[in-house]
Amino acid sequence: RSEIFQRYSEGSFDPNCCFSLYYGEHMESLDLVSGTGEEARTWITGLKYLMAGISDEDSLAKRQRTRDQWLKQTFTEADKNGDGSLSISEVLHLLHKLNVNLPRQKVKQMFKEADTDDNQGTLGFEEFCSFYKMMSTRRDLYLLMLTYSNHKDHLDTDDLTRFLENEQKMTKVTKDHCLEIINKFEPCSENQQQAVLGIDGFTNYMRSPAGDIFNPEHYSVNQDMTQPLSNYFIASSHNTYLMGDQLMSQSRVDMYAWVLQAGCRCVEVDCWDGQDGEPIVHHGYTLTSKILFKDVIETINKYAFAKNDYPVILSIENHCSVPQQKKMAQYLVEVLGDKLDVSNVGAEESGRLPSPESLRGKILVKGKKLPPNIDENAEEGDVSDEDSADEMEDDCKLMNGDWKTSANRKQVENLAKRKLDNLMKESKIRDREDPDSFTIAALPPSGKSTDKTDGSKGRGDEGTDTADEAPSSTKRTGRSFIGSFSKRKKKSSKLKKTSSFEDTDTDQESTSSASRAQPHHSRKKTMKLSRALSDLVKYTCSVGLDDVEAQAACSWQVSSLSETKAHQLMQQKAASFIQFNQRQLSRIYPSSYRVDSSNFNPQPFWNSGCQLVALNYQSEGRVLQLNRAKFYSNGNCGYVLKPACMCAGAFNPNLEDPLPGRMRKQLVLKIISGQQLPKPKDSMLGDRGEIIDPFVEVEIIGLPVDCCKEQTRVVDDNGFNPMWEETLVFSVHMPELTLVRFLVWDHDPIGQDFIGQRTIAFNSMMPGYRHVYLEGMEEASIFVHVAVNDVTGKARAAGGIKGLFNRNPKQASLDSHAVVHHGRKHPFGAHLLRRTASAPTRGQPKPKKGFPEIAIDTKDYSSEGASEERESEDRDKASAATSHQFTPPQHRNGESLASCQAKGPWDRPDTNGAFHQEEGKVQN
């Protein structure tokens, strides 16, 4: 039942008449009650057929339907008086909304040409479509077509074959294939009869999925799925049941349905004793709402394999008494049935893990397991309770009295306030993203000294707790509810080198107890585990991690680490951590300080081979965009194969040259143009705001040595069809781990506003001329050229090409009248009123590659909540002055990449970026 229906008591509605529709990124529900059960079934059946029809559409039909819907919606919204037609004033207002900067006379001329019904002075919908077609004719595509057609206004089959083979890198292109393209995309019947592709057909083809940057083969599983589970990155969720923050949000079974259908293959279930002997699921020691364990398992059973049948890992965080553990085991067996994997695996075995292929359709239980030395007839036994996968629960277990006692509202509110106050005091967080590490840089509080470790200074000190001790009213005999967090933070922030990466509460407790007047109960080391529940754990046995180098080599074990503990391992024992992850699974979960359900950057943990990087799926933003890009590369099945060097042998991701002797990849991206870029979502004046001044940023995310950013110049007053035609060049050591992120920004003298993004795995990019559609936007895209070369030695790119269009250097638009005025400055007041102002930018040190050491991630440095992960604030290159022109990257001879000439746009490798031969070679 949905949350809405749960608010009503049993019997309020006939269950046969009720159904809910879930939609959107946040799983909102539309809850409906029909008059009869038969009517409800009719609606449900019809909706299922409708959805099946949409899902069965080919990609071209989907694109065309989306475009038609967008045109209809745009026309309706522009029709202010609702008379079914658009006047010239309504069209002018619409063009401003669409970020089109055309002279009024030009608009009137096109309006008159489109107004074919006896010049009524208005445009109906069909006339509006004609007007829009005239306005949106692509100059870049037209010139590209002229180049390959020997300056004819169409492409014949020979021209099209040459274009597909030379530019799009297709092989064995036949005449029949070209005829199929013409018949499918060419709207003019005369051109179809003559077997030629005109500009409209060529535009349709290039805007179709055939011209998308994403490799269509990667929409389905394309990797070897027969290797051990430890050789894969596995899409994982943290506290799956939560809709919002970690302290007071709603728990819903719908979240399991949502994340499983989104490709997640490892979900978390926090189990606690409930009333009437029924185990419940919620976040312990908080005010999050409670749901029944049975309902969760039923939902998982229903949706685990709705989208794909690769195995699902059920991460059980068990806090229940033995009787309720038996109830949990009963539900798991009864509800999951044959889906539950109960392979006959002995705990002492240490062979290879099974493969995703061999476990298709199976659900694995991850949890504690009784040691083999316990009597096999015993119904329960003691197991370690020191490796919880939740720092907050670890801290709360130190409260006096029964550690299973629920927290009250006052305690939770004090906890939240204390944590947030401490973070603000210690960090004075700058509202910006660190361009290198994806972390929030921290500054010591003014007027207070900061604790140091061994008198050293640096980033390792940034997380040090400087808050005062808890007020006397909150202190207790023994460990206080709030105080434990303060002491944990003080300890973890110092990044001490320890041999144990388990929970350090025991050390903290022994240290603090000496200063207390009265002794307190030490943390319980063990818990009771039911034999029935233990027997369901086979390949995924939860264990603590004492020492990554000394840990026994048992493939069946899974160790859970907080992000801060895992980061310590990456910094201190990177190569050993890689080898540890070669033989068994590790799970990384967010720090307890992320009470707002923010997410950490997963890339460093992927670089270290960690399989289960658990994220808060309810917190949309940069991190989930990276996660989606990662797993979309293999059909979004939830499993992505690690690079071979991470599955066997020695490897250190932190080295400057992590793979000596291996060829690097050189990515040459030519950013050509943009199409229908909207105004920022947080624009103060909405559609009435000024026309945007866009620029494109490309970010490489992978190994530390590969991480970097480049950006184009700004185009003034044109979001409809801006023209950049600039070349950006990147060097990549390990493309299998690399993500490429395209971002579009609106430039302001006082900051930048985020417009949209698309993130793609490096190996999922197609070569040639491609469109990059911004995620979540129907028509907005950027047009690019992609080339990848093998590089040896210390090669350095010799620059890009001015381009195939041979346009005036000042011409930054595809329309001859829309010339960019680089020297013009907008009135400051107009910019201020145009949209919500970004924070003023400050000077930023020269970027360096890689992830610097951090003490603790105190914030969702990648959350999109405030103007897309705050990447919009403090961008020095864009806002050091009010000028709207950027200086492109410089060559050795001082020429910009954009100004370097090549022999021709079709000569290889010049269009892909030339090289200095004395420094390196290009391998074609």
Image: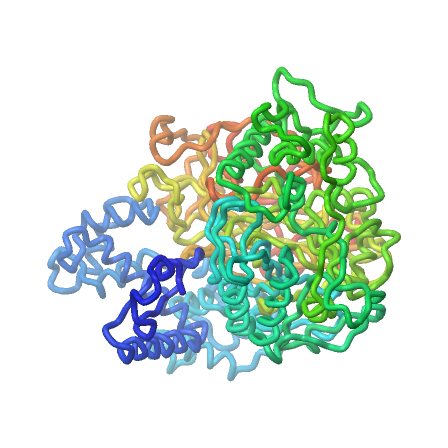
Q: Position of residue 403 (x, y in %)?
A: 64, 46
Q: Which colour style is shown? A: rainbow
Q: Nearer the viewer, residue 348 or 623?
A: 348
Q: Position of residue 168 (x, y in %)?
A: 57, 67
Quick check: can you spot residue 262?
yes
Quarter of the image for residue 476 reads top right
In the picture shown, does residue 164 fall above or below 465?
Answer: below
Q: Nearer the viewer, residue 351 or 740?
A: 351
In the picture shown, does residue 693 fall above or below 805?
Answer: above
In the picture shown, does residue 921 fall above or below 308?
Answer: above
Quarter of the image for residue 52 reads bottom left
Task: Please name the residue shown 71% across and 61% down the image.
Answer: 529
Q: Position of residue 740 (x, y in %)?
A: 61, 53
The answer to whether residue 405 is left or right of residue 808 is right
Task: Please name the residue shown 35% across and 76% down the image.
Answer: 50
Task: Please name the residue shown 46% across and 28% down the image.
Answer: 882
Q: Name the quarter where the N terminus is drawn.
A: bottom left
Quarter of the image for residue 595 reads top right
Q: Position of residue 69 (x, y in %)?
A: 32, 64
Quick check: can you spot residue 762?
no
